[in-house]
Image: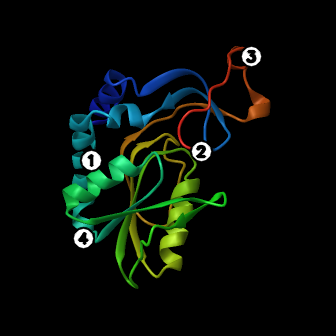
Amino acid sequence: MTEAEVIKLLKDTGAFLEGHFILRSGLHSRHYIQCALAFQHTDVLEKLGGALAGLVKHLQVQTVVSPALGALAIGQEVARQLRARFIFVEKEDGKLALRRGFTIAPGERLLVVEDVVTRGGRVNETIEIVRNAGGVVIGVAAVVDRSDGAAQFDVPFFKLLTIHLETFEPHKLPPDLAALPALKLGSK
């Protein structure tokens, strides 16, 4: 799947939004990619999941792990296509944690799957959880890397779309953006 095809799918499903948005990272942007709007269409989810699975099939993934909530659908779809187990981490007392009885065996090979990476904070939290549980993170996969390649991990990073979408610190907003009401979408 080409980057142009990914962008077309996101735009066709209304997942590529324009306006004034506050990202989970606290940064502000004129663009927001709400993958849930794309993932609600199971045929689109299957295409995106298949494309990601194709990029990582050589890794011999045993388990896919995703941070809740936004990456659950794509994580499970990638796991389904790889015929791997799927687990997720979720918020507990303001931090991500492995819950619901999920366990990771020592040496288990895990792939972290995220929908959109801006700075990589939730991915890094997930990597730390996996390693603290004795698992081995063999890669990270995302539908969109909106850091334009700036987000770095100490494992291979596979993505369907790398894009530069300008972001701003809250105290450094350009006048046109500051004039618009800010929306905070997605999971918190």
Mark 1 crowd level (few <14, some 14–19, many ≥20, 10 Å Cα): many
Depth check: give the residue in front, 8 or 83.
83
Q: Earlier in the sequence, mark 1 or mark 4?
A: 1
Q: CA distance from mark 4 to mark 2?
A: 32 Å
Question: Which residue type does callout 1 highlight?
Answer: Gly
Say if 165 sits above or below 149 in the image: above
How far apart are the alpha carbons under marks 1 and 4? Answer: 16 Å
Whole-number angstrom distance, CA of label 4 to CA of label 3: 49 Å
The CA span between labels 1 and 2 is: 23 Å
At horizontal 80% and vertical 32% (from top left) the residue drawn is 171
Considering the image in quadrants, where does the N terminus appear? top left
Can the viewer see residue 73 in this picture? yes
Residue, disc 4: 60
Q: Which residue is mark 2?
A: 188
- Disc 3 marks a residue whose amino acid type is Pro
User: Taking 129 as reference, is 140 left or right?
Assistant: left
Q: Residue at x 34, y 74 (%)?
A: 109
Number of the label disc, if any, that sits on residue 175: 3
Residue lying farthest right?
Answer: 171
- Residue in the image at 53% along x and 43% along y: 147
Q: Amino acid at mark 2?
A: Lys
**Helix or strand or loop: what does disc 1 sit on?**
helix
Residue 152 visible in this rendered orientation of the protein: no
| Label whose residue precedes the other's in the sequence (2 or 3) | 3
Residue 36, x across and y down, in percent: 40, 36
